[in-house]
Image: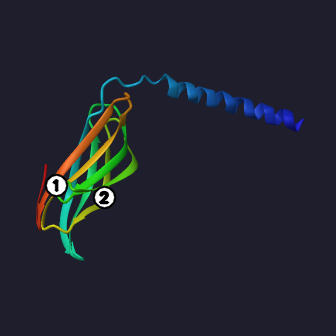
Amino acid sequence: MQAKRLGLLLVPLLFLAACEEEKTEARPKPTEPAKIEFALDDLRYEFADGRHKYFHARRYTETAGTGITLSGGKVCFEDGKACLSAQVKYRINAGKTLVQPDHHVATKRAADVITIEYWGIDDAGKKLRIKRTLRVAGEKFEVE
């Protein structure tokens, strides 16, 4: 008797799960490539421990209506001679913005060119790369 009741309770749950699967599969795959605006905001300079540090927030905005997942990135400094790479998993949904506060890049050079680059695949299956260059000279910095 108890097993019969349990079975009666599970049938509607399985039906709801199947409906949910149908909803996610029914979404059309985007055909337009994602378009990402990548900005460095709230730049702040500090010199500490023999290094010039450039604090900032990273802002990614998707504007074409196709989401993207960034899967890797690298930061290069010393005019591109030294780079640090990492695997990441940053999701920017279609038409949305992702803000990552509290980043910084440090260099021993008083004047340097720093590049920040990411790559990934959008929901239409297209590869995408984004990049920002930061030209620095002590307290002065310019984002390109």
Residue located beneath label 1 in the image: 134
Front residue of this view, candidates 55 and 78? 78
The outermost residue toward the front is: 81
Front residue of this view, candidates 15 and 38? 38
Q: Residue at x 85, y 32 (%)?
A: 4
Badge number at residue 125: none
State whether residue 47 is above or below residue 2: below
Q: Check disc 1: other Cα within 10 Å, few if <14, some if 14-19, many if 20+.
A: some
The outermost residue toward the right is: 1
Q: Say whether residue 93 is left or right of residue 76.
A: right
Name the quadrant containing residue 134: bottom left
Badge number at residue 101: 2
| Residue 72 image point, x, y percent | 36, 46
| Residue 73 image point, x, y percent | 32, 48
| Residue 130 image point, x, y percent | 25, 42
Q: Gap between marks 2 and 1, in whole Å?
A: 17 Å
Q: Residue at x 41, y 24 (%)?
A: 29
Q: Amino acid at mark 1?
A: Leu
Tell me, yes or no, whether the two marked residues, 2 and 1, touch with CB atoms within 8 Å.
Answer: no
Q: Say whether residue 109 is left or right of residue 128.
A: left
Name the quadrant containing residue 102: bottom left
State whether residue 14 is above or below residue 75: above
Q: Secondary structure at mark 2?
A: strand
Q: Secondary structure at mark 1?
A: strand
Q: Check disc 2: other Cα within 10 Å, few if <14, some if 14-19, many if 20+.
A: some
Q: Residue at x 75, y 34 (%)?
A: 9
Q: Amino acid at mark 2?
A: Pro
Front residue of this view, candidates 65 and 138? 138
